[in-house]
Structures are given as structure tokens and as C-alpha cells.
Amino acid sequence: MIGHVAQHELRRQFRDGRIRTLLIVVTLMLIASLVLSLRDYQLASNQYQKNLSQARKNWESQSTKDPHDAAHDGTYVIKPLYPLAMIDKGIKQFSGQVVHLGAHERKQSTLNEAKDHSGLFRFGELTPSFILTYVIPLLLIFLGYNAFTEEKEKQTIRLLLVQGALLSQLALGKWLALFLQMIGLWCLLFVAAAISSYSVGSEISADVSQWMALGGIYLFYFIIFINLIIWISAKASSSGMSLTVLLTLWIIITLIIPKASTNLAGWSYPFPTLQTFRDNINEDQTNGLNGHNFWNEAAQDFQQKVLDEYGVESIEDLPVAYGGLLLAEGEKYESEIYTKHFDLLQSQYEKQRSIYRWCGLLSPMLPVRFLSMAIARTDYGFLWHFEDEAEKYRVEFNTALNMNIAENAKGVNRYEAGRELWASIPEFDYKWQPPQEILRDHTLEFASVLLWAILSFLLTVFFTRNIQIV
């Protein structure tokens, strides 16, 4: 019976020219968004490799100079693009793509794409995640808002019940019809995207399990909407009422609650201003090691520590250049200060996430978006992880240069190094977070989506048994 009801629903919908037009339009939008995303991914991948090679070439081709001067000039690391970003760009357009690694200071990512666009860019762009998050749920509403109400209005539901059909069977059949149409669009997008990402030939690849994990999140999201559509259509007294309620629900889930949660999170746990952030760092640096101050208390303590370690009475008796040791130690100290304050920013972000998690109980879109961006490596978690790894490399990078001074500048009036030293510094090799670690960090978001899917399905199955037959 369920299969027969599903077949009937599919035939009824495909005979309707408006439904066919909607399906064609959404399919074309999906294809267009995928083509645009693939083009952007190819350009970004090619540009990433080119810029990475150029940054390394610039570093190695420096002229002969003091290694610490070279540390001040620094080098650049570039944020890589994960293949799954073809589906969900997340905050990529609004976060920086390049980090400058220099001496004494940790810098944030710069050069975000949004600065190169007009003000209209804030309204978004046509991406697969936009289609998945907003358009397909809206399509499902127009496909299924009259699933039950049309039967009531035409009085055909009485005939079906007289012939022995159960209301739960009718609900599941109509549910299956919507699911089959949705799964077709879902397969079109994710299979085509996965194949396209492998065809690009990028050095970075995502295995099938990660594509399935990202696809599975949106699958649950669509199922939630299908459940709500069938239930509301069964309870509504007319098709107009059903459509109105469902559109209102779509607006609440996708627009109102996400915006309200953002405002609530920002109001409850605001980030410090850039000026306050820098002032707090400068305050911690005032009496600490900075590599250039030989006379403050912290420098004197370090000097005594070095003298005791080498068993000598003065820095002139050291077998190494004391200035290089001080620079290296100052770099580590300053990095600890920056790490402390950046960790405070991350802690504030985690508090904001707690707001989003609670609001996720009111809107499934929130946990779905956080999971989608996390799996695609386009969220704040990826940004923090990349910048933390870049900072570790910056400390190692500067330590190697400063220790070269310590080992070679003893007794030299003006020590300079050249290409051999620059080439000996290893390149930055970013290690992606394992998928298991990302999913473990988003366990609550996944539980929220699963809870929405289960409760809404139970709502559909059990509460359509006692609907009013007009």
C-alpha cells in the first residue's frame, strides 16, 4: 500500500506543470552552483600552489643579511582549500587567506575575498550549500504542502480509508514520494561534486566517507522538513492554510532563529575590540623578554640562567653569541603571550557556540550549518587550527634563525647569512585535522540533528493517525 501511494503521488506531481517547472529550475540552479564552485575551486587550487611556490622562492632568493633581519622580513603561509569546500564555502570569503610570519608578533589571516567585492556580496552567492540549506527545503514545501489537504478537499481520502488504507500508510507513502524526489537532487549534487573534485587533480583529497558524512548531514536536514511537511499537511484544514504555516515555519527555521541566535551570542559573549586586544598583549609584553632589551628584570634573570647553564661568569665567556640566545628565548616568550590571548578569543567563541547549540533545538539549520562548515573545513574551527599551526611554525622558523646567530656570530663584527641558511629552513607543512576529531568536537550538533529527525518522524507517524477527515 505504501508503495502504491508513493507511485500515485509521484504521478500526480509530475503531471502538474508547475511542479515540473520547479524541479527543472532547482536542478538547473544546482548544476549552475556546482559549475561555479568547481571553477572557483580549480582557480583557488592553482593559485594556491603558485603563490606557495612564489613565497618559498622569495624566501630562498633573499640577499645576504643578518638572520634576524630576515626574520623581521619573514615569509608567508597560505590557507589551503579542502575539496569539500566546493559544497560549503562557510566563512572562507570573509576570513583571511594569508598569514605573514615575522619576528616578535603573531598576525592574523589577511586578504579576504569579500574586500574585493561590492556591497551586494553580503547578500550571498549561488553556492551548493545555499541551494541545500534554503532552496531545496522550499522546493519540498511546494511539492508536499497539499499532500493531505488535496485529498480532503476532493474527498478522495474517504474512498481510500473505505478501501482499507490506514492513515499511517498514506502518510508514509506520501513521505516516500517526497523523499525519492529529494534523494534524486541530493545524489545529483554530491556524486557530481565528488567526481569533479577528483578530476581537478589537486594534491589535497577527501575520501568517500567524508563526502558521505557531509551528504548525510543534509539528508537528515531534508528528512526533517519532509516530516514537518507531511504532518502539517495532515493537520491543516486547507491547502492555503498548510502552505502559509509551512512558509512561516521555513522563515522561522532558516532566517529568524539563526539571525536571533547570532545577535544573542554576540550580545552575551562579545569579542574584545582590536584595540583592546592589542593593548592587553602590549601590557603583558611590557616587562617580559622581547629579544632586544638586555637590561630589564626578565632579561637579567635569563642571562643568569644562561651563565649558570654554561658554567661561566660573564656573557663574554660564553661559547655562543648571547644575543642569539636572547632573541630565541624572547620569541618563545612573546609567542606564549600571543597564544594566551588568542586562546581567550577561542574560549569566547566556544561560549558563543553554546548559545548556537541551545538555539539548535529550535532550528535544525543551525547544527546542520555548523556541521557542514566543519566537515568542509571552512568554519572558525579550521581558521583557529590553521593559525595555531602557523604560529608553531613561526616560532620554529624564528628559533632556527636566532640560533644560527647564537652559533655563528660569536666574535663576528657583523654576522650575515645567505642562501644556504634560507634553504635549510623547512617549508610549512599544514596537517589537516582528522575527520574523527572534527566529528567528536561537534557531537552535540550531530545529536541535535538526529533528535530533530527522530522526533519529527515520530510526530508524522503517530499524530497523523487521528487527523480530522473533512
Image (cartoon, rainbow, N blue to C red):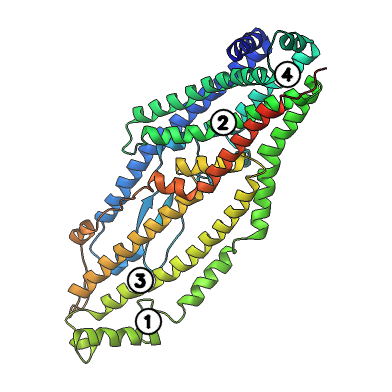
Toward the viewer: 162 or 136? 162
Whether residue 311 is visible, yes or no, is: yes
Whether residue 126 is visible, yes or no, is: no
Q: Quadrant of the N terminus?
A: top right
| Amino acid type for the residue under numbered disc 3 | Glu
State if disc 3 and disc 2 touch (CB < 8 Å): no
- Mark found first going from the N terminus, 1 or 3: 1
Which residue position holds label 1?
Answer: 293
Q: Secondary structure at mark 3?
A: helix
Q: Quadrant of the C terminus?
A: top right
Which residue position holds label 4?
Answer: 148
| Amino acid type for the residue under numbered disc 2 | Leu
Eyeballing the image, is 311 above or below 370?
below
Residue 266 sits in quarter: bottom right
Labels in figure, total: 4
Q: CA distance from mark 2 to mark 4?
A: 25 Å
- Mark found first going from the N terminus, 2 or 1: 2
Task: Give coordinates of residue 187: x percent, y percent.
Answer: 48, 23
Eyeballing the image, is 119 above or below 39?
below
Q: CA distance from mark 2 to mark 3?
A: 46 Å
Q: Secondary structure at mark 2?
A: helix
Q: Nearer the viewer, mark 2 or mark 4?
A: 4
Q: Image check: 273 left or right of 373?
A: right
| Amino acid type for the residue under numbered disc 4 | Phe
- Mark found first going from the N terminus, 3 or 4: 4
* Residue density around tag 2, few if under 14, some if 14–19, many if 20 or more, within 10 Å: many
Q: CA distance from mark 3 to mark 4?
A: 69 Å
- Mark found first going from the N terminus, 2 or 3: 2
Q: Identify the residue at horizontal 67%, vertical 32% (top origin).
A: 459
Q: CA distance from mark 2 to mark 1?
A: 56 Å
